[in-house]
Structure formats: structure tokens, C-alpha cells
Amino acid sequence: MTDFFALEPGEQVERLAVAGQAALRHWGVQNATLDLIKYRENAVFRIEHAGSRMALRLHRYGYHSDAELHSELQWIRALEDAGIAVPTVVPAESGDLFVKQGSPDLPGEVQVDLFRWIDGKQLGSVEAGISDPARVATIYETLGELAARVHNQAAQWQPPPGFRRRAWDAEGLAGEQPVWGRFWEVAAASPSERDLMNRIRDRIHRDLRALDTTPASYSMIHADFAPENLLVEGDRVRLIDFDDAGPGWHLFEIATSLYFIQSEPYFDEARDALINGYRRHRALSDEQLEQLPLHLVARGFTYVGWVHTRSETQTARELTPMLLESACTLAEDYLSRRARD
């Protein structure tokens, strides 16, 4: 069999669609129409069947253990029970929250789960930015309110026995094996950039270890709280894609929301609106906000780690120069600021 990972994205999608169609039997669905919605970390298909629509997700090989995926889906259901607008998990007929599906055309079994379809328009994307810059204040105020409500639920929630998610803590961001990869080893880095990354890694790790990890500032977070993961329909906003959810600092969540608009002319307006929206539902002190630059630089190098460990993908090839330059600029600024303190 041709190496799956050497295939073009379109060929990979064709093979995953066959596996997705086979997996649907676990939900009593046959001969459904599958339309690709997104193929980056996972493959997500829209399912048309018997007059209803659903979203079928096939996961990246080896990214999450079965326990980690089960935990993600448990938290999504807990958020929904708390009245937060998130996707509705559709259990298989067996009651399982996901299934594993093999295929002769795949290198192994793939994890598959199913959600009720959500109508709406993305607030934006990494590549295209905010969908409606004229409404940036409204968008980010809404985003801040939703983030605060998620953190409120997480800070008081008791995860069930066996709950497992990788943490966005000091080790997960700048330890020996970060969640998204050893960013300082990215092949595209120049010698000076590599030296800078080794210095900033030590600084990030040390500064993060000094931060509070009580529920006041640290709990389960979505960890990809970006405009592309917010769907808007009328006045309703839903948060999607919990693939990276795990324990982390609330400010890391906020940094993620702001990261890709730092060079935009509306950045200050968006940041202020996000903070105002957040504070409407949850305390966030000025002293806490002083740590935002630390979380921004930590966030930046997670993206460098992401493209490093996915260098075979077209997305990684396209984004690597921009992500490396952005993260290194933040690192230089942060090290300079720390040297003056």
C-alpha cells in the first residue's frame, strides 16, 4: 500500500471518506452523503442523511489516546449541560462517544466521532483574518464573554475518574516534550533564530513555573479560542473544535484569541473589547493582565512546534516562515523587556 502520509491531501481525504462511511454504521447510518468541510488536524465531513445534517470527524493518527478523546467529549457534554453553546455529541448506538474504524487503505484504525450539525459563519480564519472588521469590537466582546463562561464552568467542574488531557502548563509549552513539538528544532530556523529559541524557551519555562495554578487563573481551557472556531448565526455564537482542550492558564486562552491580529490596526480595540467582555462574567485583574506578553510569546512558539511536527503538510509549508518570524519578534521583545525589569 502506498504510504498514506506521502499521498496528496485529496487522496488522503478520499481514503478517509471511505472509512468515515464505514464508521457510520455504528450510528445506524448507511449510504450517507459526505462533503469535506475541513482537513487540517482532523478530517471533518458534513453528513446528509434522511433529511438531517451532522458533522463527522476523523482524527489525526496518534494525536490523542482513546482516553484523551473520551475526556474531550465528556467535557463538551459538561459544557453543554452548563448552558454553553457547544456542539452536541451524538453517541453511537452502543452508547460510546466515539468509535475506531479500520480500512485496507489506511495505516491503522482511526478514531471517529459525530456531532449534530451547527449552522453559522466563522468569525474569521488564520489565513483571511476577521470576516467583518467593522464589527471587531462586537466580535471580541462576545468572544471574551464566552471565554469567561467556559472558564467559570471549568474552574468549578470536577472531572470524572480517568479524565486525561494534555496540559498547556510550563512543561507542555516549554519543557522537553511540548504538546505541539520541540519548536527549537524546526528545520527552517537560522542559527541565530535557533539560539534565540533556546534562550526564550528557558525564560518561558522559568516564568511560567512562577505563575498561579489555582482555579482562579488555571483550569480546563479550549486552547484554540480563535475566530475560526466561533460560528455565528444571528445573535447566537457557538464554540467548536475542542481538539486541543486541556488544563491551562486562562490568560493563555486570551493570548490565543489575540495572537493572529497583533499586527492589525484594530488590535487595541479588539483586546480592550475582549477584556471588557470577559470581565462581565469573570474577574480578571490588571496584575494578571501584566502576564499577557508571556502567554503571547509562549503561544507563538507552540505554532512553530505545530508546523515543525507537521512539516509534511501543505499548511505547515505555507505558514512556517510567517509563524517563525512572528514568534521570534515576540521573543526578542520579551527578552528585552525582562532584561529591563
Image: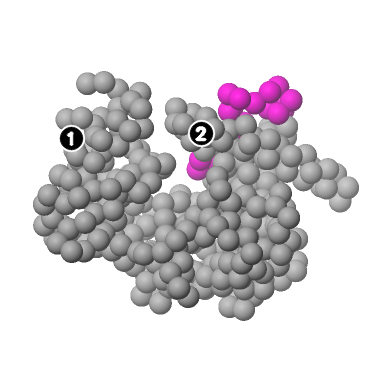
Q: Do the residues under discs 2 and 1 have CB atoms within 8 angstroms?
A: no
Disc 1 marks a residue whose amino acid type is Ser
Instruction: Name the residue tied to disc 2.
Output: 316
Q: Is residue 24 magenta?
A: no
Q: Nearer the viewer, residue 303 or 227?
A: 227
Reading the chain from its start, which is encountered first: label 2 or label 1?
1
Spatial CA span between label 2 and label 1: 27 Å
SS type, badge 1: loop
Q: Position of residue 223 (x, y in %)?
A: 51, 55
**Is 60 left, or right, of 170 in this rendering?**
left
The residues colored magenta run 178-195
Q: Is residue 110 visible?
A: yes
Number of other residues with Cα within 10 Å of mark 1, as a class: few under 14, some 14 to 19, many 20 or more: some
Instruction: Name the residue tied to disc 1.
Output: 103
Q: Is residue 191 magenta?
A: yes
Disc 2 marks a residue whose amino acid type is Ala
Residue at 61 percent of width and 71 percent of height: 138
SS type, badge 2: helix
